[in-house]
Image: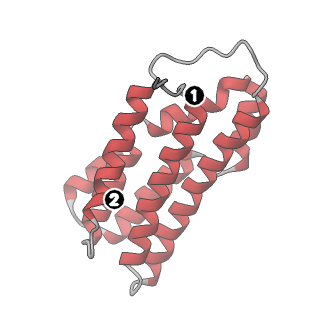
């Protein structure tokens, strides 16, 4: 008999944060010859890895809590949808990518529900644990500001610049 696995939002969304990190590590490798871009994408990837680790730590801290209520928007279907979008990009296996294309992909990722869900998951253990966990890593809002600044520096596409302002 095949039994479905239980949906563990903290672990599943930690995996999604790691997928985002893989994409940003890929960007870093694609821009090896441009140190500023390489380092920017490497740092973005490390911050996504931090987010994944923080979700795993949060899970360990609240493992025995019984009164957790999960936002209905955080579900297995949403996790699969987001993971599918990220995996689709990784499966393309881009041997090269224009700078603006990398930023377009990052804007798509950073404007998705991932950061909102991340923030809600940190609050599962209550506001004290949520604040502690948030302070362990780079907040998503700071990461979005870094992305905006880098986009302004490395891109001239007006549509991308406008999209960045909406982050």
In the rendered view, tell whether residue 64 sits above or below residue 56: above
The answer to whether the residues at label 1 and label 2 have Cβ atoms under 8 Å apart is no
Quadrant of the rendered structure where residue 103 is? Answer: bottom left
Task: Assign a secondary structure to mark 1.
Answer: helix
Q: How many labels sit on residues?
A: 2
Q: Where residue 71 appears, x then y in whole percent?
A: 52, 18
Whether residue 88 appears in this view of the structure is yes
**Of the image marks 1 and 2, the number of the one nearer the N terminus:** 2
Quadrant of the rendered structure where residue 158 is? Answer: bottom left
- Whole-angstrom CA distance, mark 1 to mark 2, is 26 Å
Q: Quadrant of the C terminus?
A: top left
Instruction: Please name whichever residue, 54 or 79, is drawn nearer the observer in this view of the structure.
Output: 79
Mark whose residue sits in front, 1 or 2: 2
Whether residue 164 appears in this view of the structure is no
Q: Identify the residue at image location x=36%, y=62%.
A: 151
Instruction: Please name whichever residue, 150 or 38, is drawn nearer the observer in this view of the structure.
Output: 38
Question: On residue 35, which mark appears?
Answer: none
In the rendered view, tell whether residue 47 sits above or below residue 122: below
Instruction: Please name whichever residue, 163 or 34, is drawn nearer the observer in this view of the structure.
Output: 34
Task: Assign a secondary structure to mark 2.
Answer: helix
Q: Where residue 23 appears, x then y in whole percent?
A: 41, 60
Callout 1 crowding tier (Cα within 10 Å): few <14, some 14–19, many ≥20 = some
Question: On residue 90, which mark appears?
Answer: 2
Colouring used for the render:
secondary structure
Q: Identify the residue at image location x=39%, y=69%.
A: 27
Q: Where residue 137 appears, x then y in whole percent?
A: 67, 50
Callout 2 crowding tier (Cα within 10 Å): few <14, some 14–19, many ≥20 = some
Q: Identify the residue at image location x=77%, y=38%.
A: 132
Residue at the bottom extreme of this rendering: 33
Residue holding disc 1: 120
The reply, left or right, for residue 31 in relation to residue 39 is: left
């Amino acid at each position: 008999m095949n039994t479905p696995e239980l949906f563990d939002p903290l672990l599943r969304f930690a995996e999604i944060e790691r997928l985002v990190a893989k994409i940003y590590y890929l960007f870093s490798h694609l821009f090896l010859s441009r140190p500023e871009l390489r380092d920017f994408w490497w740092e973005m990837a490390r911050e996504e890895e931090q987010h994944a680790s923080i979700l795993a730590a949060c899970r360990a801290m609240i493992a025995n809590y019984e009164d957790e209520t999960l936002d209905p928007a955080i579900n297995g279907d949403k996790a699969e949808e987001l993971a599918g979008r990220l995996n689709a990009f990784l499966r393309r296996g881009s041997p090269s990518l224009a700078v603006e294309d990398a930023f377009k992909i990052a804007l798509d990722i950073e404007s998705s529900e991932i950061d909102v869900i991340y923030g809600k998951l940190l609050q599962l253990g209550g506001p004290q644990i949520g604040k502690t966990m948030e302070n362990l890593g780079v907040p998503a809002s700071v990461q979005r500001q870094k992305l905006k600044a880098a986009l302004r520096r490395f891109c001239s596409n007006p549509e991308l610049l406008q999209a960045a302002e909406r982050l």
